[in-house]
Amino acid sequence: MESLTCTVCGGPLTVETTAYCNGCGGAFHFSHSADPGEDDCGQAWVHMQFLTLEFGCNVCLGRAPGQEPPVGMGH
């Protein structure tokens, strides 16, 4: 994995803490464990119709302070 940065906070990402947003495709911090010490920059949920796991970064979800959610694809 090449050196990636989080599209939400700009911090470095590792394989263990990376997810990709279904809205914009950007990489963001998302802990793959239940460790309460990890700060996630997005959320995951189950799509009720297709029963798939979907990911959304805080920018696309409108939860990033000082950043407007995108109108279309991408930030």
Image (cartoon, rainbow, N blue to C red):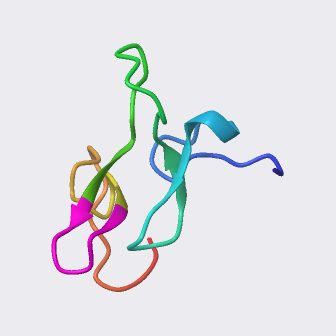
- Residue 73 sits in quarter: bottom left
Residue at the image point whose x is 26% and y is 71% from the top: 51
Q: Position of residue 32 (x, y in %)?
A: 49, 36
What is the residue that sits farthest to the front in this orientation? 51
Magenta segment, which residues?
Answer: 46-54
Q: Position of residue 61 (x, y in %)?
A: 24, 60
Q: Position of residue 10 (x, y in %)?
A: 56, 42
In magenta stretch: residue 53: yes
What is the residue that sits farthest to the bottom in this orientation? 72
Residue at the image point whose x is 39% and y is 35% from the top: 40
Q: Position of residue 8 (x, y in %)?
A: 45, 48
Residue at the image point whose x is 26% and y is 43% from the top: 65
Whether residue 15 is visible:
yes
Whether residue 13 is visible:
no
Q: How many marks?
A: 0
Left or right: where 12 falls relative to 56: right
Q: Nearer the viewer, residue 8 or 18?
A: 18
Left or right: where 64 falls relative to 7: left
Residue at the image point whose x is 28% and y is 82% from the top: 71
What is the residue that sits farthest to the left in this orientation? 48
Q: Nearer the viewer, residue 56 or 12?
A: 56
Left or right: where 56 falls relative to 8: left
What is the residue that sits farthest to the right in this orientation? 2
Left or right: where 51 falls relative to 55: left
Q: Nearer the viewer, residue 10 or 56?
A: 56
- Residue 75 sits in quarter: bottom left
Q: Nearer the viewer, residue 53 or 61?
A: 53
- Residue 24 sits in quarter: bottom left
